[in-house]
Amino acid sequence: DSVGSSKNNNNIMQQNQQQEEQQHHQQQNHNPYNTPSMKLIQRLSKRNETLCFAGDSIDSQIHDALSNNLRRIQLLLQNNINNLKNNHGQQQLLARITVDEREIAVDYVKEYGDGAEWIKGWMVMTAIKETSVTVEWRDGSRSTSRFQFFKTYGYPPWNFEFMNECTIVSFNLGLHYNARAPGIPNGYYGQHTLSDDIRGAITFLMDFVAAKENRIAVWRSALPQHFSTFDGHHEKGKDVNCSLNPLKLINSTRGQVIQNYNKAYEEVFSSFCDNGGNLLQNKTLSSSCGRREHDCTVNRTSVDYPTPYKFFSDNNFTRHMERFRGGDDGKDSNLVTGKILRWNIADLFDVGQWHISDCSHYCYVPPLYEAAFERLLLLLDHHSKTL
């Protein structure tokens, strides 16, 4: 029957994903510089892509972990360049990599005008953190790629205009919302609910991918917290010690953790995308080789939730509203459609011992982050093959 067929298909897709990951591991075991981080950088340089992590301090850590992983390879090459061999026992072709970091100052008043003077505070981004990586080969060729971090605490739509040079945006919202309160409200920027802010972020991401070819939108799962509470969430006024017990996983292959932020993601994506929103009918769920993706159609000029358009309109940033003007074809000119890939890695981080003292952030454990970047790489590569 159809139910049994669906289960069999899911099992096959999960087995395929496990086989792909095993092949990656086998390659890494024979080639010390051929890590997921290095492969990710090679992909970015080959396709002239810029990877942007947009989120809170967790995404800052992810950005830094990718940089640190590459610096480890940089040191390995410096110390062992004459001893490294490729899979065939031949001298490997990689000669040197250089990792450089800088901060790009952000000026909201320059971008939006004098009406943006109120955009300030400890949660507001003052600079874009950027890492550039130059790879040099023994044949004399070289390539450069870059990845960036955008400080996106809560839901700040004023950041989006600075992401125009991004090719891939990995987005996340969560930790700065009250996980226990009804609606999971944000304590900043007007007490928006997490669900409404996710809708605003999805609308930005769909507008982002529709604006230029070859852009990719990714939604990262919330990572598990391990506070000594029944669900791991922080509870104000309670014991803040970390629990060493992992949370219960719903499905480890999809990285869904019993945590309110991830539950909110599932609810919004199932109702707002995949033909389940108000614009279309017939709710479905798209899945490919065990890696989730969503088809979303949104009205980018909606004011029913905090869209970028609503932000520009509320603050009278008329210059930025010009690009939302519809064409001559009528009422649906502001509907945009695209895909959002789901980077599900919560199960990888479900280890209480790997936290620093606050039970939300994680220590720098290179294999942990390599496993996370391997999933991102597989996700992106699979998506590119389907285009």
Image (tube, grey):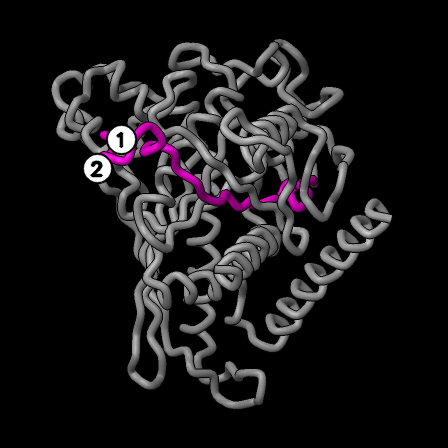
Above-or-below relation of 216 to 321: below
Residue numbers of the magenta segment: 324-350
- Residue 3 located left or right of residue 312: right
Q: Please name the residue shown 82% across and 52% down the image.
A: 5
Q: Please name the residue shown 53% across and 42% down the image.
A: 295
Above-or-below relation of 4 to 179: below
Label 2, secondary structure: give it. strand
Mark 1: give few (<14), some (14-19) or many (20+) Cα within 10 Å.
Answer: some
Contact flag, marks 1 and 2 (Cβ < 8 Å): yes
* Residue 258 x/y as whole percent: 71, 30
- Residue 198 located left or right of residue 78: right
Label 1, secondary structure: give it. loop
Mark 1 = which residue?
126
Mark 2: give few (<14), some (14-19) or many (20+) Cα within 10 Å.
Answer: few
In the rendered structure, find residue 372 and report the number of the disc placed on it: none
| Quadrant in which residue 105 is drawn | top left
| Quadrant in which residue 107 is drawn | top left
Mark 2 = which residue?
105
- In the rendered image, residue 327 lying in the magenta stretch gets the answer yes
**Amino acid type, callout 1:** Thr
* Residue 298 x/y as whole percent: 43, 31
Q: Please name the residue shown 36% across and 31% down the image.
A: 332
Above-or-below relation of 348 to 115: below
* Residue 47 x/y as whole percent: 36, 64
Using the rendered image of the protein, determine whether residue 361 is visible from the camera's viewpoint: yes
- Give the total number of marks visible in the rendering: 2
Q: Please name the residue shown 36% across and 73% down the image.
A: 96
**Amino acid type, callout 2:** Ala
Q: Say whether disc 1 or disc 2 marks the residue closer to the N-terminus.
A: 2
* Residue 25 x/y as whole percent: 65, 67
| Quadrant in which residue 236 is drawn | top right
